[in-house]
Amino acid sequence: MGCILMMAALLGGCGGDPQQILQRAASWTAAAEMTGEHWLAGHLPTRYATRTLTRAAKELLDAAGRPGVRPDALRAATTAAETLRAAIDADDRAGARRAVDELTRRARELAQQAQEVRT
Amino acid sequence: VKKVLEIALGIVTSIGGFLEVGSMATSAQAGAQHRFSLLWVLVLGTACLIVLVEMSGRLAAVSKHTIAGAMRERFGFGFYVWPLVILVPVSLLVLGAEIGGVCLALQLLTGVAFPWWTAPVALAVWLLLWKGTFGMIEHGTALLGLVTVCFVVAAVTLHPPLAELGRGVLPSWPEHDAGRYWFLAVSILGATLTPYLFYFYSSGALEDKWDESHLAINRVVATVGMTFGGVLSAAVLVVSAMVLGPRGISVDSYEQMGLLLVETFGSTGFYLLVASLGIACFGAALEISLATAYFVAQGLGWSWGENVGPREASRFAVAYTVAIALAAVLVQIGVDPLKLTNLSMVLTAASLPLATLPFLVVMNDPRLLGRHRNGRLTNAVVLGIVTLAFVLAVVSLPLGILGG
């Protein structure tokens, strides 16, 4: 029984610590930014890029709804990831470039917030 | 010439078949989150694996017993049932993670969600086992698995700082996130020391009809093949530390792993990653299905063998069929494949004493191995590393749960 509970906890993912939430959010924001950069460079297929950005936006939105974190930067990062996905879908390279720049700023901000919570 | 060819094929098979979902995922996470500081765990795990693989080949070549068969004969079925009821469920989790890895590779390639791929992938694994021969399965997937050498090329191209790499080989205390560090350490040990590897190896040696003349080949293949395999895992760690770590990407999902090789190889990098993940996991899924069926069939005294065909070893064929079906259900219901991988690797590490300690006793039995039984150094190495893995697993499971 104990083993089943442990498995359920692990597989379900129960990281409620604000520092971990912010670190994970910063990681997804950076992944979205890198995906955009390499899509612009022609290194990544559009299908992979849009799917990764959809997942990133979902993860960031989830994080924004968690208790103990300031949601502003997380919501802004969510919007930037969604904007990038839409730009890639529409093959709008200028729009994608702007969204990547925004994600760069948000990734830095979230990493800084995670660092502040840790210290 | 025949011996040289056998050695070369054995080494190539070991290298091509070394990487699987556990070693790829845990190495990538370790590099991204802790740079090179977990390299020492890979070194330790690979050293122990070399010893275990050499032991299992020696047992098969000298005594004509597989590990499972020798364990049952030495301890009786009353004892054997314990490893059976613990190791088989853990193997099913690992098999689920491997099938999930193939499905994720297909998801990365096509954009179609991974649960949709479960049935076709499981069917392909089953069909190959049903129709194929041991040699085809062992060598075919391993030769294709040589694509994973691209990680070594990428690691060299990225020019990692050698002094820091050297420091990483020495055990160290984590600078941050101690819980996560030790959880990853034990995941790496679990991924490197997966029992299916050495259980599969001893059964394979019997399928290939090894005798005492193969002892030298066994020693060279175990040492050189597993060392190069360990280098592959280390290369994944280095690439992740150089590419994802500096950006703060911690590998929270397999989607993020899709970015690992694009910095080095451009657009080819994405496809190399997909091929590496897909082929390595497919090969491992075949081997774990077989290893699980070997373990059950040999323990229960059924006829077994991939070369004899399903008609002659029907219960053996049923065993791998059921194993594949159960593992596929785990993936089909949408369990996060990365979490499944991490969990199965830690549980593998926790179950190591059960997989290795009876094996050690068997390897010291003069009736089975005569003058080829284990020396004190071999026993000490295995005992030391297995104890470390077990203690770390018991400590890090709660840490992993608390840390999510």
Image: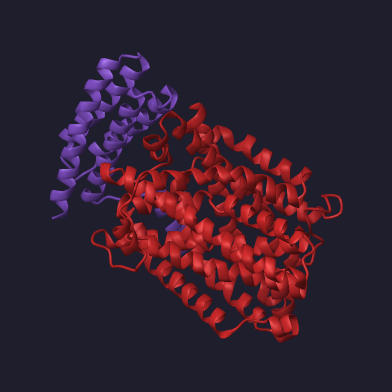
Chain colours: A purple, B red
Tally of numbered tags: 0
Q: Quadrant of residue B55?
A: bottom right
Q: Is residue B397 visible?
A: no
Q: Position of residue A16 (x, y in %)?
A: 27, 50
Q: Position of residue B347 (x, y in %)?
A: 49, 62
Q: Position of residue B160 (x, y in %)?
A: 33, 50
Residue drawn at x 64%, y 41% is B122
Q: Is residue B201 above or below residue B72?
A: above
Which of the pair B129/A69 is nearer the observer? B129
Residue farthest toward the front in the current orientation of the protein: B1
Which of the pair B333/B382 is nearer the observer? B382
Q: Quadrant of residue B222?
A: bottom right
Residue drawn at x 42%, y 69% is B394
Residue farthest toward the right in the current orientation of the protein: B312
Q: Is residue B173 above or below residue B100?
A: below
Which of the pair B337/A105 is nearer the observer? A105
